[in-house]
Amino acid sequence: MISPWDRWYSTSCCLCCHVRTGTIILGIWYMLINAVVLLILLSALNDPIQYRYHLTSSELGTDIDVMDDANICIATAISLLMILICGMATYGAYKQHAAWIIPFFCYQIFDFALNTLVAISVVVYPNTVQDYLQQLPGTFPYKEDIMSTNNVCLVFAVLLFIGCILSFKAYLIGCVWNCYRYVSGRGTTEVLVYVTTNDTTVLLPPYEEAIAIPPKEPPPQYMEA
């Protein structure tokens, strides 16, 4: 009987490329995104007056500081951690070190779980969509048109959008998992071949010694009287 893990195992992913290549591309893509975010956050720390903005009383009725120094420092640390994790996954897929891919795979599982909780909260509390739309600034495009939409249709559209995102994230998780299985399986095969070759070399004597050893004489045969 084929297990579910073996049934979904494949060494190819989207665009017919290898799972190692797909994991490397995914890791580099995540690193570029987090690098851009990190540059923006460092610029905000360098010149906080330029990047700090306040929502005016005409938008929410209060003056709220959206981005302060503490939040910027936390976001900077998260961006650095993400760059490190994505770099480990890229290096592990390139050098075929399976252990380096595990942190990135765990991050994907955590991100998928958060998006699933968002989808569940929308189903359980459908009014949260309207509450979120009311918190948007008045300059948000098509805000009034979106709020005038039926709540059921609005919730269905949000769930459909989140479902597409979850499906795409699940596919990426499967690609990284297949890459981990491929790299770990390849490493195990190389170790087994090495051990087998080593045992064979130890058991067989060198060619010169095998020639120098005289052949054993056959035991004497006695003829029947």
Image (tube, rainbow, N blue to C red):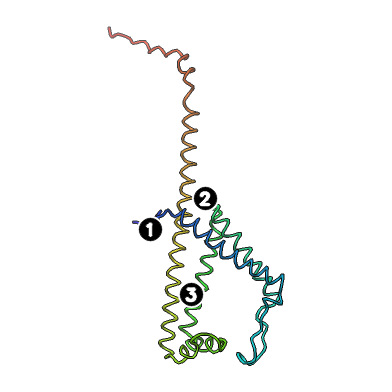
Residue 94, labelled with which disc? 2
Amino acid under disc 2: Tyr
Which badge, 2 or 1, comes first in the chain's sequence? 1
Q: What residue appears at the point 50 percent right and 74 percent down from the top-left corner?
A: 115
Residue 3, labelled with which disc? 1
Amino acid under disc 3: Thr
Disc 1 on helix, strand or loop? loop
Q: Residues within 10 Å of mark 2 (few under 14, many from 20)?
A: some
Mark whose residue sits in front, 3 or 2: 2
Mark whose residue sits in front, 2 or 1: 2
Q: For this rendering, which residue is in front, 110 or 206? A: 110
**Is 161 located above or below residue 37 in the figure?**
below
Residue 174, labelled with which disc? none
How many marks do you count on the picture? 3
* Horizontal and vertical percent position of residue 195: 49, 37
The reply to whether dot 2 and dot 1 touch (C-beta < 8 Å) is no
* Horizontal and vertical percent position of residue 122: 48, 83
Which badge, 3 or 2, comes first in the chain's sequence? 2
Amino acid under disc 1: Ser
Q: Taking 187 as reference, is 79 left or right? A: right
Which quarter of the figure is the N terminus placed in?
bottom left
* Horizontal and vertical percent position of residue 127: 49, 89
Give the CA separation, mark 3 to mark 1.
26 Å
Q: Residues within 10 Å of mark 1 (few under 14, many from 20)?
A: few
Kindly give the residue lying farthest to the front in the view shown.
50
Q: For this rendering, which residue is in front, 12 or 205? A: 12
Q: Which residue is mark 3?
A: 116
Q: What residue appears at the point 47 percent right and 34 percent down from the top-left corner?
A: 197
Disc 2 on helix, strand or loop? helix
Which badge, 3 or 1, comes first in the chain's sequence? 1
Give the CA separation, mark 3 to mark 2.
31 Å
